[in-house]
Amino acid sequence: AESAGPFAGLCALLVTRLGMGKRVRIGDIGFRLRYQAGRRCIKLQDGDTITSMCIVPGDEMPVLPPKPRSPEEIYQEERAEQLDRLKQEQEMQHEEQDMQLAEQPEEDPDSLDCVAALAGAMTRALEVATLQIRSRSDVHAFAMLKDNDRATYEETAEREHEAYAAAMEARHQMEPGLRRLGQLIVCTAGGSAAHVNVSAVQVQRLANSGQTLIDVPPGDEVVSACLILPAEEDADGHALQAAERGQFQALADLA
């Protein structure tokens, strides 16, 4: 595919009959000659079709990291992972022991090998049981940790809170600019309508099926969509409409 050139920062916004939608980068669609087949830009559900399309910017809202955890939550999750690993190790050990017993002739149950194997299995089972008991009171166990051990979890929690706060601040600073992308008004044949911020419509790869823009009840369908842009003021303070700016087009109704 050739480079999108001057259209590299733009996306095609697609709306389907069943209320799904997505933004696809023009560069991902690629250039085609008039006699060549196009590229499938959205994975449609059975019976769904494209209703409308327009060209919009490809600016995206920054993705937030997972919500920060408390030191106690980090400790509990770590203990749960340890317990899962011990359980898996114990199951694998039991399987190996069963295979060894099936392959070897019966031995004296009082032999050293049998006693050692039994002792090892009992030790692993005891470790699992101990962790299970402790996991029921992890909050109290966390409070009883040494200061140095507890500080490790507190530092991790602090880093997560700082990263989340920084991402929220970046998101907040971008909101005014992203609001200038406009809103999408989606209407159904049954008389329902919804408006969605263009910035909230995800930019996705071609193979994805998009996201729900409007909940379409059974028997209804999306029949029209329109792009609305906020008015701007010129040097004299007069509002300039989107059509006068010539930056965007209204969604073409292809139904």
Image (cartoon, grey):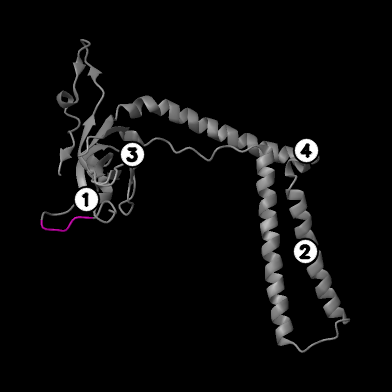
Main SS, magenta region, reads: loop
| Boundaries of the magenta span | 35-39
Q: What's the residue type where badge 4 is placed? A: Ala
Q: CA distance from mark 3 to mark 2?
A: 51 Å
Tag 4 residue: 143
The crowd level at tag 3 (other Cα within 10 Å; few <14, some 14-19, many 20+) is: many
Label located before the other in sequence (2 or 1): 1
3 vs 2, front mark: 2
Quarter of the picture containing the C terminus is top left
Give the structural element (helix, strand or loop) at label 1. loop
Between the residue at mark 3 and the residue at mark 4, the CA separation in whole angstroms equals: 44 Å
Q: Mark 4 or mark 2: which comes first in sequence?
A: 2
Question: Are the residues at dot 1 and dot 3 in contact (C-beta closer than 8 Å)?
Answer: no
**Identity of the residue drawn at 77% across and 52% down:** 133
**Residue 88 within the segment the image draws in magenta:** no
Q: Which residue is mark 2?
A: 125
- Return the disc, 4 or 1, that comes first in the chain's sequence: 1
> Residue 110's spot in the image, x, y percent?
89, 81
Identity, as a three-letter code, of the amino acid under mark 3: Val
Q: CA distance from mark 2 to mark 1?
A: 57 Å
Q: Residue at x 33, y 47 (%)?
A: 210
Residue pointed to by mark 3: 201
Amino acid marked by disc 1: Thr
- Name the element at disc 2: helix
The type of residue carrying mark 2 is Ala
Q: Is residue 219 left or right of residue 144?
A: left
Tell me which residue sits at (81%, 65%) in the image.
Answer: 123
The numbered mark at residue 49 is 1
